[in-house]
Amino acid sequence: MHMRLTAVLVITLFAGMAVAGDLQRTDLTAKDLARVRAVTAPTSDFSRPENFEQLPGGAATTKKRVNQDAFSFSQANLSFEQEEQFKLGNALFRKLWVASPSSTQASDGLGPFFNARGCQNCHLKDGRGRPPTGDETNSVSMFLRLSVPARDADEQALIDTRGVLLFPEPTYGEQLQVFAVTGLRAEGRMVIDYANEEVTLGDGTVVTLRRPTYSVADLAYGPMHADVMISPRVAPPMIGLGLLESIPEADILARADPEDADSDGMSGKANVVRDPVSEQVMLGRFGWKAGAATIRAQSASAFAGDIGISTPLVNGPHGDCTDAQADCLAAPTGEQARLGVSEAPDPVLDLVTFYSQNLGVPQRRKVDDPQVLAGKQAFYAAGCTGCHTPKFVTSRDAPDKQHQFQLIWPYSDLLLHDMGEGLADHRPEGAADGREWRTPPLWGIGLTSTVSGHTFFLHDGRARNFAEAILWHGGEAQKSRDAFAKLPKSERDALLAFLESL
């Protein structure tokens, strides 16, 4: 019943904007709309690359050297003045914050509890985070989200109307903080245990998956709530975010089918969130469950939750401290009137947002390779494009010129999908239930090893390669997963080569 009510709420909030399968854009002339429909239509020719397929970010695509810095270049179409903004934002993204008080007052405000001292600590080289490995006891690029269920109908109504997305754990807040400033104890420690499971593919190949279980040890401030819900998250890559932000809502909502009206087994659903600036309900696009509508809001949330830094959007200089943590609330803060009304005032948040909006997507490799083209065909035939929508054309009315009217290839619909019990975290976030995840963009995924030095995938990094990631797919993606598992090795290898080319 609650799922149906949530679907009705989403439809009501966006009534009149889009009908499933039909684009309704107000930024285009009829002629341009026809062009967009033609260029974004699914291909049926896998004998050669599509036009502009090698440029996943359109004119913004970066064509620089492919190395560990491949995700850290600015979009190719920035002006000279915008390049200066980008470099300033990059400096702030890499900045290490310090505890208050200190001699570097513009860097004051860390914590008091935190998971990282700077944005780059989580988004290493602007790439993908990973779970701890070997003897590591903590991972700064992976953390645990915390919340508790609504206690009554009034609290559930608050979630349904997007007054809040969730209710924090009463003592430890929305996120387990594994570090603390001097004089305080960190909240606790994330513990991961893996159990191996074997999967036999159609040709007899055996693949070993690792199923994680999560717990918390060394809690410093008492036990957690009996009904606490825990969800692990690795930091996602940063490329192409401004282009994703510029996809018209109508194009995303046109692909939503929360009640599976067409009976194709795909029931993509939009998450809707309340924008902290306008207080209006907007389409969620960012985060593993699409819990943020804008890059600015996502950046402010990360400042507060990951580093303990206040911004004009997320006030409160004590970060994720709760009323149950008196020593944390009594700790010095970095708010200084002469520098602004928060620890990271508007100029800082503006520059970090601009940087995050304008990290370029690298050029595709091997788009005309016969094996890659065969893998692309297998990707389509398996139904993967039912969620991983290959291409969009961004809005002519996007706020920034460099993001306007670009043909982009993110391979995501930015919608929520039921991914099955195997990937479920059983922790709702707004309209997203405990089995639903936003389709992650696939652009750049083939450079994960080059940039990040690992190949851990999915929301918690459990998959150690592409094949394992695919085999974890369930729910709406079960048919696609099974189709992959039944492929002969040559076709599986081709599909994996296609992913490597993205």
Image: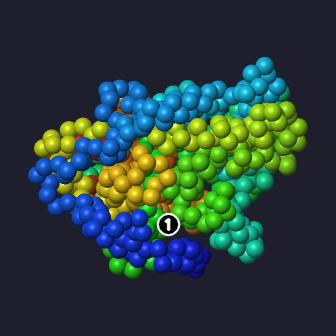
**Residue 445 shows in the view:** no
Residue 73 found in image quarter: top left
Residue sticking out furthest to the top = 103
Q: Is residue 260 left or right of residue 379?
A: right
Horizontal arrangement in the rendering, residue 441 relative to residue 491 (left or right)? right
- Tell me which residue sits at (65%, 30%) in the image: 117
Give the mark count: 1
Instruction: Tell me the SS state at disc 1.
Output: loop
Q: Residue at coordinates 32% horizontally, 46% vertically from top-left?
A: 58
Residue at (71, 59) in percent of width and height? 167
Q: Quarter of the image for the C terminus: give it.
A: top left
Q: How is the image coloured?
A: rainbow
| Picture quadrant where residue 116 is located | top right
Q: Residues within 10 Å of mark 1 (few under 14, many from 20)?
A: many
Image position of 57 (left or right of 282): left
Residue type, numbered disc 1:
Ala
Q: Position of residue 501 (x, y in %)?
A: 26, 41
Query: Residue 277 location in percent, x, y?
Result: 66, 56
Is residue 13 in view? yes
Q: Nearer the viewer, residue 286 or 91?
A: 91
Residue hosting label 1: 270
Query: 7 or 31: nearer the eye?
Result: 31
What quarter of the picture does the N terminus occupy? bottom right
- Residue 39 % position (x, y): 25, 60
The residue closer to the viewer here, 147 or 334, is 334
Q: Residue at x 32, y 53 (%)?
A: 407
Residue 259 to residue 111: above or below = below
Q: Name the spot of residue 309 as percent of width and height, x first.
A: 71, 38
Q: Nearer the viewer, residue 30 or 339?
A: 30
Is 106 situated left or right of 192 in this image? right
